Image (spheres, rainbow, N blue to C red):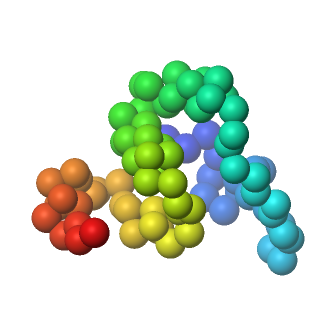
Amino acid sequence: MAMPFLKGENPHRPAPGSVLKVEPIRDRMAIGRIKKMLRDHPRDLCLFVLGMNRGSSSNGTVNNVKPSSSMEKSAQTFSP
């Protein structure tokens, strides 16, 4: 799958040193809309649903997931 822009040229990436303020999603309808948007991307939908059901932030959690990762590999190394 090709990226719509070249590596390092993402216009949505924040400028270095900038601060992002992130708010939790509190509206159930917004969660439903996000799930609907992600239904064609099972990996992203799975990560979103797991994150929502777990109820914790994703700081450092998703950083270790690579495109070559599979559910089987993750399930073997997962420890609660």
Residue at 45% x, 67% y is: 61
- Residue 29 position within the rendered picture, expressed as x and y whole percent measured from the top left: 65, 24
Q: Residue 45 sits in which quadrant?
A: top left
**In this picture, residue 79 sits left or right of residue 20:** left
Residue at 56% x, 62% y is: 57
Residue at 69% x, 50% y is: 24
Tell me: residue 34, above or below residue 70: above
Tell me: residue 68, above or below residue 26: below
**In this picture, residue 63 sits left or right of residue 73:** right
Residue furthest to the bottom? 17
Q: Nearer the viewer, residue 72 or 30?
A: 30
Tell me: residue 48, above or below residue 64: above
- Residue 37 position within the rendered picture, expressed as x and y whole percent measured from the top left: 55, 26
Position of the N terminus, as image quadrant, is top left
Residue at 22% x, 51% y is: 71
**In this picture, residue 3 sits left or right of residue 77:** right
